[in-house]
Every structure is written in C-alpha cells, then in structure tokens.
Image (cartoon, grey):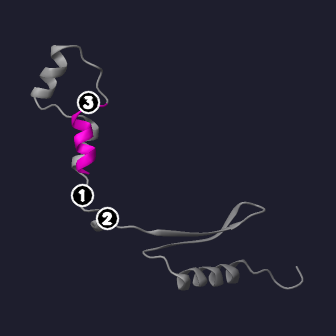
Amino acid sequence: MTKIRSMLANQSSVGEPERRGDERSEARRSGGSSTLERAIASVPPDPEVWTYFYLYVILDIFSRYVVGWMVAPRESAALAERLIRETCAKQASPRGS
C-alpha cells in the first residue's frame, strides 16, 4: 500500500484535466487529492481483515447451463462433494427418460 501511495504522490491527479505551470504546483501545495487517492486512503490497512468467499460452480459443458452453485467461506473437498451430491439429486431424471 505504501508503494502505491508513493507512486501516486509522484504523478499528477487522476481524473482532473492536466494543468499548466503554476496551477499544477499550486494544486499540490494546497493538498488537492484525486478520487483514486481518496479511495486508496479508505482501504483497510491489513488485507487480513477482508472477507473472502469461494464460488463453486457446476456447468453443463454442452448447454453452458449452470447446473449447480454454492458460495462458501472456505475451500474444501467436503463442500465440493456436498454440492455435487445435491446437484445430482436435483438434476436426476426419472429412469427410462
């Protein structure tokens, strides 16, 4: 994060029209910040506090239809097995069809 902030400090403001001469240096002295800089400043400092989820998807490769899906807080073979089992039960066609 520090590297990104230092890179932004060395560049002109994003999203603002380029200024000429004294206007640019005046904007830097007055502490004007770009939208990108404000967005980065609002990001939590530690990525460990972010919440990640895993999306499990089962696709029918011929029709490109999503047959089953699940969102889970962790990656696990047991969760994948459960999704496959439940999806097969839902999609099972009666014998002889």
State how far apart marks 3 and 1 are (Cα): 22 Å
Q: Secondary structure at mark 1?
A: loop
Label pair 2/3, CB-CB below 8 angstroms: no
Query: Upstream in the sequence, badge 2 or badge 1?
Result: 1
Give me the disc on residue 13.
3
Which residue is rendered at x = 69% and y = 84% of the image?
89
For mark 2, does the 10 Å Cα neighbourhood hold few (<14), some (14 to 19), or many (20 or more) residues? few
Q: Which residues are magenta?
A: 1-14
Q: Mark 3 vs mark 1: which is more N-terminal?
A: 3
Query: In whole angstroms, how far apart are the C-alphas of marks 2 and 3?
Result: 28 Å
* Amino acid type at mark 3: Ser
Looking at the image, residue 76 sits to the left or right of residue 6; the answer is right
**Secondary element type, mark 2:** loop
- The quarter of the picture where residue 36 lies is top left
Per the rendering, the mark at residue 50 is 2
Please name the amino acid that badge 2 sits on: Trp
Q: Which residue is mark 1?
A: 44
Query: Between 91 and 48, which is closer to the camera in this rendering?
Result: 48
